[in-house]
Image (tube, helix red, strand yellow):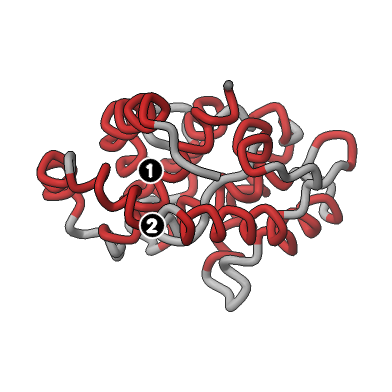
Amino acid sequence: MKIVSLQAIEALGNLMCYYNSDLNYIAYFHNFKNGKITESEYLRNEKCCFKRFLNEYKVARNVKKNKVKEFMSFTKEWVLSENSSEVDKFAGILKEKGITQDGKVMTSLASKILFLNNPETIIPIDTLNKRAVGEKSNIYSEFKAKVNLFISENKKTIEEYLNSVNPLLSEVEVNFKSIEIEFDKYRITRFVDKLLWTKGKK
């Protein structure tokens, strides 16, 4: 699957538009994970906090309203464990705990939350991204395998497009040096996420 230039330009626009806000959400989550802000502070539906993230990333409806605090607390436990990047396993346990609506496995929810912890490797899964790579299952590992193939086949093109905006992305990243994140890898995963989302719309 090749990258279409007009789609790449739209994806770059989306990348630039949301780059700062995405990093703010990641920074707030890392502050929560590392104990720099309390559960009550992070739970709020305010700028970059947990409830705001659920709403903005369109997964609030996947969580039972009376389980949001439990979900947030369990997420912290999970990302501090050795399973921190296991999206499918995390999604399954959220179902077992009765946190997700209608007793369903919510892989999109799980991937978007774990993206906050490990944004260099986790690309959220949703309907548009799945459509772009031709994935019909709700299994993250199968989706990610196709995404990795897409990246491998288009590595040079992805790098060329990113090179055109890297100086601007660097200016944004200056404000987030306290986050333990490899920005070179993060730029790729965020751009690929925007590319797939754009392709999935067509």
Determine which of the numbered discs, if any, sits on residue 75 in the image: none
Question: Can you give x and y, in whole percent of width and height, for residue 51 in the image?
Answer: 53, 32
SS type, badge 1: helix
In the picture, measured across the screen, residue 70 lies left or right of residue 84, that is: right
Residue placed under numbered mark 1 in the picture = 191
Q: Nearer the viewer, mark 1 or mark 2?
A: 2
Q: Which residue is located at x 56 percent, y 59 percent?
A: 149
Of all residues shown, which one is farthest toward the top? 202
Residue at the spot 18% in from the left edge and 40% down from the top edge? 165
Task: Report the amino acid beneath label 1.
Answer: Phe
> What residue did someone put label 2 on?
155
Depth check, front residue: 22 or 15: 15
Q: Is residue 173 above or below residue 81?
A: above
Q: Nearer the viewer, residue 137 or 29?
A: 137
Residue 42, by quadrant, is: top left
Mark 2 Cα-neighbour bin, 10 Å: few <14, some 14–19, many ≥20: few
Residue at image location 63% in from the left, 61% down from the top: 145
For residue 54, say whether it is visible. yes
